[in-house]
Structures are given as structure tokens and as C-alpha cells.
Amino acid sequence: MLIAREVVKSFGGVRAVDGVSFEIARGTITGLIGPNGAGKTTLFNCLAGAHRPSAGTLLFEGARIVGEAPDRIFRRGLARTFQIPRPFPEMSVLENVMLAPMGQTGERFWANWFAAGTVAAQERAIRERAMHWLDFVGLTALAAQPARVLSGGQRKLVELARVLVAEPRMILLDEPGAGVNPKLLDTIVEKVAALNAQGITFLVIEHNMDLVMTLCRPILVMAQGKLLMQGSPDEVRGDPRVVEAYLGGAPA
């Protein structure tokens, strides 16, 4: 579904991503791990269009996406979340989720006068979808509340719901477990697994190794900008290079 070939991203003389190649199969939950500074988020930014790779090729469902703007990649069905969600704090939770679908008729100024019926019908449909996904992530009761009242974990669930309203086929999740209490973390894991069962493909950056080993197959490991290895949880756990790079010591 997603193919990276010899992807490089340089900042001055530093190669944050250094010749990384991999393939993501449709219908999988793939983990992406590595120590801080390994280049994981920079790679995500290249995949989502926030950074243009210095070299290499990226293909999503057979289409070349190198150099495309983030909104165009999003329209293709490749969405992302962020490690630190930043909802619009004074807008309601529901309004934040309703923002995601692109090309809404009401975004065009004159359409609100000359196509008011179309605008209203589309808004009702988007509201219904937004409420469906808020119910899915367990936040229906907070739909009318301003987003500023949400905890960090709830903000991650709202961001997931917002992405889902746009009906992506693949989601890049950036540290869904960071700063989340154990109960909400279990909820996030459960929802990701359920969405994957519905056919959504995931690539997940995560430092919580229990989450990665439970949820992700296969797992990609980065270190110093390079792809160190990829394999099953057992293969990753037992690889001396991973233990050295990620945990800082030899395997027991």
C-alpha cells in the first residue's frame, strides 16, 4: 500500500533520514520504533508531505507522492495524527471533528447564499459522521464541550475521530500512547485494532514497547536515520542490533 525507496531527508549536513526503504502491506498495523533522534518523525513528515525528501521515492497505492502538498496526500486517503494534538480550544469537540472533510461546500463564501440547501445537507451528513466516530472513541458525552477541557488522552481520541471522518485508507499514528493514562491507552489500542479489522492500514510510531509488541506486526526499527531491521516482535526483541541501539546494551 505504501512503498518507500531510498528516502533521504537532509537538514544542512545532517541526514535525518538516510536511505530508508520499506513496504507497508495493506491491512497491517506496522510499528516504527527507535531511540530519540532516530529519524522517525522526520520520516513521517516526508510521508505526509510536511517535508519534501531530499532524495528517494514514495508511492501510495501506486501513485508517486513525493513533493505533493499535505492536503493532496490527505485527499488520497493517507492521513496522520500528531504526538501532541492541538485542537481548537474554544470550539466544541464536535466542531473540531467536523473540520476534517475536505472540499466542504460551505467553505466557499457565495455558496452559503446561493446553495444554502446543499450546504445544510452536507453539514448534517458530516455532523452524523462526526457523532458516529465520537461515539466510537467513547466521547459522545463531551461533544458539546469546548476542546480545552479535554485531557491529553482524550485529545488523542478526538484527533483520531477527526481523521476518521475524512474516511482515510491508511493512518500514520505518531506516538498514540505518549502521556496517556493506562485506561485510555487500553482504549486507544482497542480502537486501533477494531479499525484495522475494518480494513484501515496503520503505521505507528511508539515508544511504549508493550503496545508495539502487542499491536504491531511487522515492526520497523530505525537508528541514526537508517532502517536497522524489520521483522516480527520476537525477531525484533531478540536482535542484538536492536537491543544495542534501542536499549543500550546486549541481550540477556
Image (cartoon, rainbow, N blue to C red):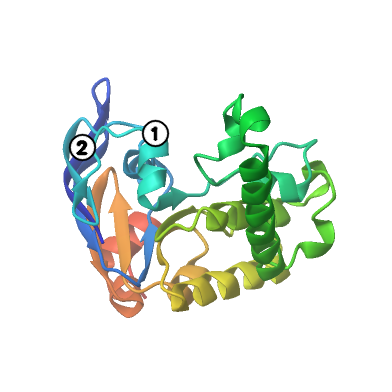
Q: Position of residue 99 (x, y in %)?
A: 62, 42
Is residue 135 among what the camera can see?
yes
From the viewer's perspective, tell me whether residue 85 is left or right of residue 230.
right
Q: Quadrant of residue 23?
A: bottom left
- Kind of residue at badge 2: Val
Which residue sits furthest top?
12
Q: Quadrant of residue 92?
A: top right
Task: State the residue position of label 2.
Answer: 8
Q: Relative to 106, say whether 193 is above or below.
A: below
Q: Position of residue 65 (x, y in %)?
A: 25, 42
Q: Quadrant of residue 37?
A: top left
Q: Position of residue 197 (x, y in %)?
A: 46, 78
The residue lying toward the viewer, choosing from 95 and 57, is 95
At x 66%, y 69%, the residue is 136
Q: Residues within 10 Å of mark 2 (few under 14, many from 20)?
A: many
From the viewer's perspective, tell me whether residue 151 is left or right of residue 103.
right
At x 53%, y 76%, the residue is 194
Q: Secondary structure at mark 1?
A: loop
Q: CA distance from mark 1 to mark 2?
A: 14 Å
- Kind of residue at badge 1: Ala
At x 60%, y 31%, the residue is 111
Which residue sits furthest front?
114
From the viewer's perspective, tell me whether residue 117 is left or right of residue 245.
right
Q: Position of residue 67 (x, y in %)?
A: 26, 32
Is residue 156 among what the camera can see?
no
Rendered image: mark on residue 50: 1
Say if mark 1 contacts mark 2, CB within 8 Å: no
The residue lying toward the viewer, choosing from 158 and 252, is 158
